[in-house]
Amino acid sequence: MVVVIVDIPGGTELQYEQITATIFPGGKIPDGWIMHVAGPTENGWRVVNVIPSQELFEVFAREQLLPAAQAAGDAPPEVTFFPVHRLIQN
């Protein structure tokens, strides 16, 4: 399991909503994904995902996320990965 942090410099809520409408049809994250959260930062927009593997995200980014971000006029996202040691949920 891996955490994927996606920072979008200059990204906005409107662009985020446009992108997620395309990549998460019906408001559903892809099968196997555990969590998706998003919100504003000082420099734009941040998205945090918890998913099964970095490789799975890289395929998703190449095939869906990057084309949708380009269509929304977003700057190229900055992506950081780190392995999950523990996930605690209620």
Image (cartoon, helix red, strand yellow):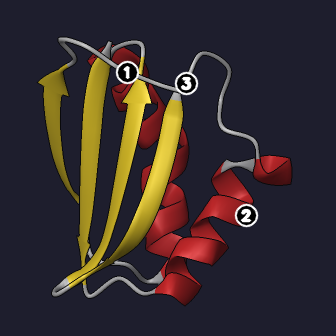
Mark nearer the viewer, 2 or 1: 1
Secondary structure beneath dot 1 equals: loop
Which residue lies under the disc numbered 2?
21
Residue 33, label in figure? 3
- Name above or below for residue 32 compared with residue 64: above
Residue 88, label in figure? 1
Frontmost residue, 21 versus 46: 46
Circle 3: residue type:
Trp
Q: CA distance from mark 2 to mark 3?
A: 17 Å
Q: Indicate left or right for 15 with 7 as reference.
A: right
Q: Indicate left or right for 2 with 24 as reference.
A: left
| Residue 86 lies in quadrant | top left
Q: Return the x and y of residue 75 as percentages of the image width and height.
A: 27, 77
- Name above or below for residue 12 compared with residue 46: below
Circle 1: residue type:
Ile
Residue ID at (55%, 45%): 64
Q: Residues within 10 Å of mark 3 (few under 14, many from 20)?
A: some
Circle 2: residue type:
Ala
Q: Are marks 2 and 3 in contact (CB under 8 Å)?
A: no
Q: Are marks 1 and 3 in contact (CB under 8 Å)?
A: no
- Precedes in sequence: disc 2 or disc 3: 2
- Report the residue that reaches farthest toward the front: 90
Residue ID at (16%, 32%): 81
Q: Return the x and y of residue 88 as percentages of the image width and height.
A: 37, 21
Q: CA distance from mark 1 to mark 3?
A: 15 Å
Q: Residues within 10 Å of mark 1 (few under 14, many from 20)?
A: few
Q: Indicate left or right for 7 with 66 as reference.
A: left
Residue ID at (53%, 25%): 34
- Name above or below for residue 89 compared with residue 12: above
